[in-house]
Amino acid sequence: MDQRISTDVVNHRNGDYAPIGDQEDPKLGMFDRRLPCFGCGIGWFSLLLGFVFPVMWYYAAFLYFAKHYQKDPRERIGLEASAVAALICTVAVLITIAVFVIKALFH
């Protein structure tokens, strides 16, 4: 075996550690850390908490439209779900207000 060529096993035996990486995909290992908010991500946490505090849906929708998911693509689905919940909440509130206004005008 050629002693000039270093392999991971040789580096490990010497006490050195080689970083995990891939020539074709440099992002490999970039997202190995846990997601914030108890591991479920900001989007899903905001979706669940939004049923108690609907303002959280609007906060997550803002993060979605501000492209916060580019920092960590795993956040995208939860932020999308919260944005949809914010849209549904807004439509429901507008319909409720319209019903009360129409009811007040005709009575």
Image (cartoon, rainbow, N blue to C red):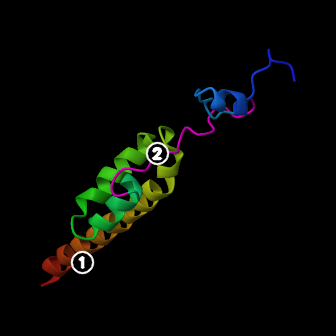
Q: Position of residue 99 (x, y in %)?
A: 24, 78
Placement of 83 over or under 99, stated as above or below: above
Visible residue check, residue 89: yes
Q: Amino acid at mark 1?
A: Val
Q: Residue at x 80, y 19 (%)?
A: 5
Q: Quadrant of residue 14?
A: top right
Question: Residue at label 2?
Answer: 33
> Few, some or many C-alpha atoms within 10 Å of disc 2 (few <14, some 14-19, many ≥20)?
few
Disc 2/disc 1 C-alpha distance (Å): 48 Å
Q: Quadrant of the C terminus?
A: bottom left
Question: Residue at label 1?
Answer: 99
Q: Residue at x 71, y 33 (%)?
A: 9
In the displayed structure image, the side of residue 74 where residue 104 appears, left or right: left
Q: What is the span of residues highlighted in magenta in the rendered image?
A: 23-38
Q: Secondary structure at mark 1?
A: helix
Placement of 37 over or under 90, stated as above or below: above
Q: Residue at x 45, y 58 (%)?
A: 78
Placement of 79 over or under 2, stated as above or below: below
Q: Secondary structure at mark 2?
A: loop
Q: Amino acid at mark 2?
A: Arg
Q: Position of residue 6 (x, y in %)?
A: 75, 22
Q: Quadrant of the N terminus?
A: top right
Task: Single out the residue that lies furthest toward the right.
Answer: 1
In the displayed structure image, the side of residue 48 where residue 30 appears, left or right: right
The foreground one among 68 and 105 is: 68
In the displayed structure image, the side of residue 79 where residue 37 appears, left or right: left
Q: Main secondary structure of the magenta part?
A: loop
The foreground one among 12 and 61 is: 12
The foreground one among 21 and 8 is: 8
**Of the image marks 2 and 1, the number of the one nearer the N terminus:** 2
Q: Position of residue 42 (x, y in %)?
A: 36, 53
Q: Position of residue 106 (x, y in %)?
A: 16, 82
